[in-house]
Structure formats: structure tokens, C-alpha cells
Image: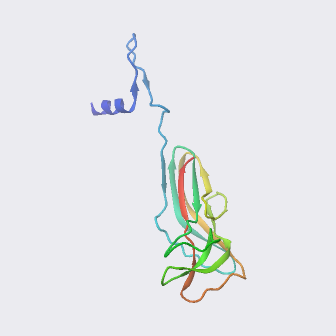
């Protein structure tokens, strides 16, 4: 009887017709959309930097969806002790290892992020789509890359270049 009650709760049952048939219809819009997105929280990726192109595989993004979806990334412009310097959206900035405070050295080029066969996208301060998918299951690591110029500053001991990236997903 529990099974019958569950079905009755999920479906609308139309009145019995004169011939004794029962007509069953789904709820408004049929099947509900379902979207699940995961990425390890607070992942840290160490990207060795040298002059030229540098890249590394980052955390894995997993999506299960029965509707089309997008995955986006952006630089929230904060980490450690306060906001990043003006004009540094999407770029790696010098960061004191001991205090977590931002310094003034900023790499010339923005960090790039790519998910599977999605477009390689320059990180910025606003959310940008890095992958578009259809219904199904998807799992792939982020590819993170940084082009360093010969004119970019070498940092003193106790400082690293850093950037925080927020990755999110949703039904589109």
C-alpha cells in the first residue's frame, strides 16, 4: 500500500471515465529538472612558474544533470587579509606567506582556465562560462595555465603569486 500512496503523491490521477479506465498524467512540466555539481572545496593548486606558458591539472569538476548546464569561473578579488589591488582581476598577485596580505606585484597576463574541451578562458572579476554541457554525467579536471613574461617581477623570499578562483555550475 505504501507504493500506491507514493505514486499517488507524485502523480495527478484524473477521474475514472465511464468505461472504468484510469487516466494518469504527470505533474506540470513532466519530469523535474535535476542538477548536481561538485568540486573539492578550498582546493589548493601549486602552479610552478617560469617564463613562458605554465599549466597544471587542477581539481576535478563533476556534474550530473538531466538538463543543459554551464560551468563558470571568476576571481572574487579577495583572499587572506582583504581585497586584491585594483586592476588585478583575474591576475596572480604577490601574497605574503606569513601574513596572507596582498602586495603590489601583479603578473601581466591573467590566469587561464579550461574544463575538458571547453574554451580556454582568461579569468576575470566576472563569471565567465568555461564549459557548456547537456544532460548526462560529466567529470574532468580543470586545466589551469599562466603565461609569464620575462618582464614580470621575481618575488623576494616569503612571497608567492596567488589568485583565488570561484568555480560554479548551474542549469542553463
What is the residue that sits farthest to the top in this orientation?
A: 18
The answer to whether 30 appears left or right of 153 in the picture is: left
The relative height of residue 150 versus residue 11 in the rendered view (above or below) is below
> Can you tell which quarter of the image residue 106 is in?
bottom right
Q: Position of residue 54 (x, y in %)?
A: 65, 74
> Can you tell which quarter of the image residue 156 is in?
bottom right
Residue at position x 49%, y 54% in the image: 37
Can see residue 138? no
The answer to whether 75 appears left or right of 150 in the picture is: left
Q: Position of residue 44 (x, y in %)?
A: 50, 72
What is the residue that sits farthest to the front in this orientation?
A: 86
What is the residue that sits farthest to the left in this orientation?
A: 1
Residue at position x 50%, y 79% in the image: 100
What is the residue that sits farthest to the bottom in this orientation?
A: 157
Seen from the viewer's position, the closer of residues 80 and 25 is 80
Q: Position of residue 32 (x, y in %)?
A: 47, 39
The relative height of residue 160 versus residue 4 in the rendered view (above or below) is below
Residue at position x 61%, y 64% in the image: 125
The relative height of residue 6 versus residue 44 in the rendered view (above or below) is above
> Can you tell which quarter of the image residue 113 is in?
bottom right
Q: Position of residue 1 (x, y in %)?
A: 27, 30
Amino acid at each position: 500500500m505504501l507504493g500506491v500512496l507514493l505514486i499517488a503523491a507524485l502523480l495527478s490521477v484524473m477521474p475514472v471515465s465511464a468505461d472504468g479506465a484510469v487516466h494518469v498524467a504527470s505533474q506540470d512540466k513532466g519530469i523535474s529538472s535535476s542538477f548536481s555539481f561538485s568540486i573539492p572545496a578550498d582546493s589548493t593548486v601549486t602552479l610552478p612558474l617560469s617564463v613562458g606558458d605554465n599549466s597544471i591539472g587542477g581539481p576535478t569538476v563533476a556534474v550530473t544533470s538531466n538538463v543543459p548546464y554551464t560551468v563558470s569561473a571568476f576571481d572574487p578579488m579577495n583572499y587572506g587579509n582583504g581585497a586584491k589591488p585594483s586592476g588585478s582581476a583575474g591576475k596572480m598577485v604577490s601574497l605574503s606567506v606569513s601574513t596572507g596580505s596582498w602586495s603590489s606585484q601583479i603578473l601581466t597576463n591573467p590566469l587561464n582556465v579550461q574544463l575538458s574541451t571547453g574554451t580556454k578562458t582568461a579569468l576575470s572579476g566576472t563569471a565567465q562560462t568555461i564549459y557548456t554541457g547537456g544532460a548526462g554525467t560529466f567529470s574532468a579536471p580543470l586545466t589551469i595555465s599562466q603565461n609569464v613574461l620575462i618582464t614580470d617581477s621575481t618575488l623576494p623570499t616569503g612571497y608567492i603569486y596567488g589568485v583565488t578562483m570561484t568555480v560554479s555550475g548551474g542549469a542553463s
